[in-house]
Image: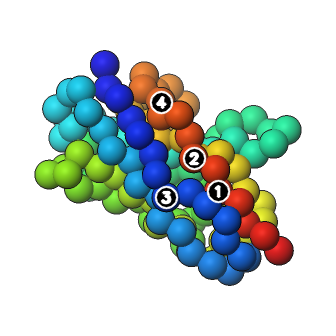
Amino acid sequence: QVQLVESGGGLVQAGGSLRLSCAASGRAFSTYSMGWFRQAPGKEREIVAAINWSGGMTHYADSVKGRFTISRENIKNTIYLQMHSLKPEDTAVYYCVGEGWGDTWSSWGQGTQVTVSS
């Protein structure tokens, strides 16, 4: 079992930037994929980005391509989501996920709120 703790959410104006972090513990971090989901009020949860165990393969939702970057530091057991050019529609609770790919993940963090004001 993997434990995930997110940090870095907050309130930002449209056009601004934020960086989310997710610290993992409980199993060898460098052996599994990680990712970020988000859920906006009244909407279904959606995957934002994912990264494989080595960082050599990434996936992004079309809505964030070119604006968000997912990365990982295996030595720190941490992944990041760098978000630029934020839009009000990026407002959501962002969840860190581990051990999976696509829509199926075994481990979930508690979530961190990102609010983008217009």
Please name the residue that numbered disc 4 is placed on.
108
Question: What is the spatial separation of the Cα atoms under label 3 and label 4, in whole angstroms?
Answer: 16 Å
Q: Nearer the viewer, residue 111 or 28?
A: 111
> How packed is label 4: few (under 14 Cα within 10 Å), some, or many (20 or more)?
many
Question: What is the spatial separation of the Cα atoms under label 4 and label 1, in whole angstroms?
Answer: 17 Å
Please name the residue that numbered disc 3 is placed on.
8
Q: Position of residue 36 (x, y in %)?
A: 50, 46
> How packed is label 2: few (under 14 Cα within 10 Å), some, or many (20 or more)?
many
Residue at 81%, 42% in the rendered image: 41
Query: Residue farthest to the bottom?
Result: 15
Q: Which one is in front in this view, the residue at disc 4 or the one at disc 2?
A: 2
Q: Which mark is residue 25?
A: none
Question: What is the spatial separation of the Cα atoms under label 4 and label 2, in whole angstroms?
Answer: 12 Å
- The answer to whether marks 2 and 3 mark residues whose Cβ atoms lie closer than 8 Å is yes
Residue at 42%, 22% in the rendered image: 106
Residue at 16%, 32% in the rendered image: 28
Label located before the other in sequence (1 or 3)? 3
Q: Amino acid at mark 4?
A: Trp
Q: Amino acid at mark 3?
A: Gly
Question: What is the spatial separation of the Cα atoms under label 1 and label 3, in whole angstroms?
Answer: 9 Å
Label 2: which secondary element: strand
Q: Position of residue 97 (x, y in %)?
A: 45, 36
Label located before the other in sequence (3 or 4)? 3
Residue 43 drawn above or below residue 70? above
Q: Amino acid at mark 1?
A: Val
Label 1: which secondary element: strand
Q: Amino acid at mark 2?
A: Thr
Q: Is residue 51 visible?
A: no
Label located before the other in sequence (4 or 1)? 4
Q: Which mark is residue 114?
A: 1
Question: What is the spatial separation of the Cα atoms under label 1 and label 2, in whole angstroms?
Answer: 7 Å
